Image: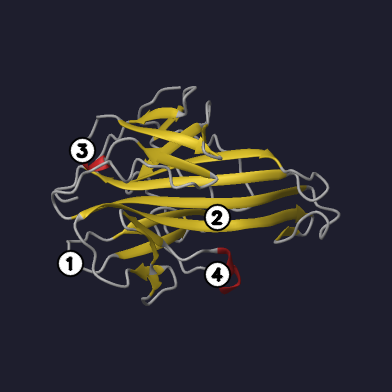
């Protein structure tokens, strides 16, 4: 399959228990300012409030710096808005989101947050885990890959091997996909950017979002993302395996995203 822009695209991924995906966005931040971030759970790049009955599935957003990890504080008009407890310094960091392992089963009546012992007539069950990761470059000169290229230990993750701040339109951003800490070969990696889809934000049908890039990982889990436009990009990968106890659930399903900016006048 071509690595270039294809709209037609890539409805390759199968429909799952929920069309929602987890991703992270951050505001442009200078050193000495409070970092503000948003937890995306819906159709990129639109944000929507998270349903109250699902809030317990999410961990607080986390900021990863050379000093370690710290939880961001949920603060703002909407429950998807977070910010750092104190001003941040210049540097290249990560902001992480996690949707905790959750059973979802489907029968003739629809989807419920249950496993197959709770829904004996289920026709499908998966234990869903989702992970979002955003590259954050605080300050105009920040473009280090030292911290952001280290795995964070998620079940499934996309590890950037270069800082996107150093990648321009048409150049290659190498990434590695890891599952349980090991390179994942032959995984389909897709990407899109803010503005690629002109879908009506009022359309809540949860059709698969159009993708601007698709390729498969090599034996070492790497793939080269080719961003063909400036702006905000989201890369995603899905990996499903058999659940450990087939009497409880059929599939273990992991979803991961990586978000970043390309070609901005600021990082």
Alpha carbon distance from label 2 to label 3 = 37 Å
Reading the image, the residue beneath label 4 is: 55
Residue 43 rendering spot, x and y as whole percentages:
46, 54
Alpha carbon distance from label 3 to label 1 = 23 Å
Reading the image, the residue beneath label 2 is: 205
Question: From where the camera sits, is residue 232 visible?
Answer: no
Identify the mark nearer the N-term, 1 or 4. 1
Q: Nearer the viewer, mark 4 or mark 2?
A: 4
In this rendered view, identify the residue nearer to me: 155 or 9. 155
In which quarter of the view is residue 109 placed? bottom right
Label 4 near label 1: C-beta < 8 Å? no
* Disc 2 secondary structure class: loop
Q: Name the disc covering residue 73, or none.
A: none
Identify the mark nearer the N-term, 3 or 4. 4
Q: Nearer the viewer, mark 1 or mark 4?
A: 1
Label 3 near label 2: C-beta < 8 Å? no
| Mark 3 burial class by Cα count in 10 Å: few <14, some 14-19, many 20+ | some
Reading the image, the residue beneath label 1 is: 32
Residue 251 rendering spot, x and y as whole percentages:
70, 43
Q: Nearer the viewer, mark 3 or mark 1?
A: 1
* Disc 1 secondary structure class: loop
Alpha carbon distance from label 3 to label 4 = 36 Å
């Amino acid at each position: 399959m071509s690595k270039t822009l294809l709209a037609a695209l890539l409805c390759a991924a199968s429909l799952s228990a929920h069309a929602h995906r987890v991703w992270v966005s951050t505001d442009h931040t200078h050193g000495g300012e409070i970092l503000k971030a948003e937890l995306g759970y819906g159709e990129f790049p639109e944000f929507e409030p998270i349903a109250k009955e699902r809030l317990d599935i999410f961990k607080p957003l986390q900021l990863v710096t050379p000093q370690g990890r710290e939880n961001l504080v949920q603060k703002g008009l909407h429950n998807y808005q977070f910010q750092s407890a104190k001003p941040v310094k210049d540097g290249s960091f990560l902001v992480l989101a996690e949707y905790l392992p959750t059973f979802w089963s489907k029968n003739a009546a629809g989807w419920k947050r249950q496993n197959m012992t709770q829904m004996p007539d289920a026709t499908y069950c998966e234990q869903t885990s989702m992970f979002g990761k955003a590259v954050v470059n605080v300050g105009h000169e920040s473009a280090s890959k030292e911290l952001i290229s280290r795995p964070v230990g998620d079940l499934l993750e996309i590890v950037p091997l270069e800082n996107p701040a150093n990648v321009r339109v048409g150049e290659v951003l190498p990434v590695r996909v890891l599952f349980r800490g090991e390179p994942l070969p032959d995984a389909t990696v897709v990407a899109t950017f803010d503005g690629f889809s002109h879908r009506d934000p009022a359309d809540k049908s949860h059709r698969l979002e159009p993708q601007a890039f698709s390729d498969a990982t090599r034996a070492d889990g790497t793939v080269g993302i080719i961003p063909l436009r400036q702006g905000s990009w989201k890369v995603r990968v899905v990996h499903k395996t058999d659940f450990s106890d087939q009497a409880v659930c059929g599939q273990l399903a992991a979803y991961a995203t990586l978000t970043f900016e390309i070609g901005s006048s600021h990082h």
